[in-house]
Amino acid sequence: MSKKAQMEILGLAIVVLLLILGMVFVVRFIALSDKGSIRKEVSESQIASNYIATYLDTTVRDCRGLTIEELLIDCAEGTPGPRGGAINCGYTLLPDGHEVKSCEQAQLAASTIFLTTFEAWKTKYYFTSFLQGRSPFLTNGTECKGQKRSKDYFLSTASGTLHVKLDLCS
Amino acid sequence: MQMGETIAVLVVFFFLLVIGMVFYVNIATTKVEESRYKNTELEAVNVMKRALSLPELQCSHNNIVDEACVDRYKLYAADAAVEANPSAYFDLFGTSTITIFQIYPAPLSGEEPVLLYDFKPATYSSRLNTSTPISIYHPLTRTHAFGLMEIVTYGK
């Protein structure tokens, strides 16, 4: 075998070795690129399941000690909307001094809670309350575009099934 | 000439070997760091689960335990108990800090945040913050407030 041929074979061997090495590392890095956080997954699932139950159980001091669940049911049974509901929770401190009804009170409580939690944690969320088959009458946050983790809670009302739903956007 | 060739091949071989070793060491280091971080994450999750199911804090009615609920009066008692016996709770919570605070309605006097457990090591490699919503039950007024349990876990 000539000297030139030997050198060519050596060169080829080096190229093949480098290629194999490169491939191995690419595969290893792809396998290692799983950045999914256990803590994030567990805390998101914990948050999604605890959030609505805790929110609905919360007593509203400014509205005769009723719970948010009671306010939402009243809101859904009355005229669902931002200022709907039959229960009067007093008057707002805003210049127009309008009556705060159950729907607005539930929305105010949700806004206060979300401001200190999801908004502060920069977590994208979409919180809705709606009667089955109808469009939401109370919303917080913005609709998720991609994947999401959802928790739906059902309440029985005279107007039908009330859904209280929380989407955590991924 | 033969000797020169052998030396050239050996140089190339060792060169490749060194490159391989460098990559291997780098990857091994990354893997060790990653598994250490994952362990801290698991510890954070464990501490959260243990804190949520601590009988010293749980609300109960007729012996039925409410999930994710903390009794305000039990909380004050537990705070004193943890402070008095830190070593007993170290096995449960390790190097972490657990704080419980009320978000809604706005806390009144006597409803300030409670630092239930605090064991912050002098040095730590990572610090993980985990929060979970909890209901804070006031047994005298029979009202529930929306609160958060904030757990900070420190990695070794």
Image (tube, helix red, strand yellow):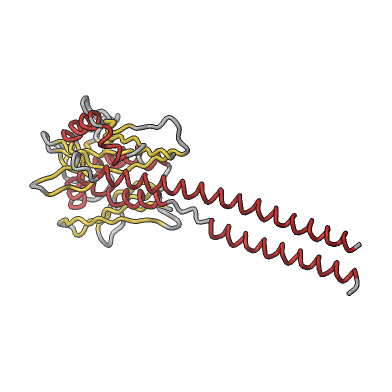
Q: Quadrant of the N terminus of chain A?
A: bottom right
The residue most toward the left is B62
The location of residue A114, given as percent across then percent down, is: 34, 41
Q: How many marks?
A: 0
- The residue that appears at 91% across and 62% down in the rendered structure is B1
The location of residue A49, given as percent across then percent down, is: 28, 52
- The residue that appears at 34% across and 41% down in the rendered structure is B131
The residue most toward the bottom is A1
Is residue B98 at all visible to an observer of this figure? yes
Against A149, residue A110 (above or below) is above
The residue most toward the top is B109
The location of residue A36, given as percent across then percent down, is: 46, 54
- Taking depth in this image into account, of A150 and B5 the one nearest to the observer is B5
Against B63, residue A31 (above or below) is below
The location of residue A46, given as percent across then percent down, is: 31, 50
- Taking depth in this image into account, of A11 and A6 the one nearest to the observer is A6
The residue most toward the front is B3
* Relative side of A80 to A140, left or right: left
- Taking depth in this image into account, of B143 and A17 the one nearest to the observer is A17
- Taking depth in this image into account, of B61 and A132 the one nearest to the observer is B61
Is residue A59 at all visible to an observer of this figure? no
* Relative side of B33 to A52, left or right: right
Tell me where residue A92 sits by quadrant: top left
Tell me where residue B151 sits by quadrant: top left
Tell me where residue A102 sits by quadrant: top left
- The residue that appears at 22% across and 24% down in the rendered structure is B109
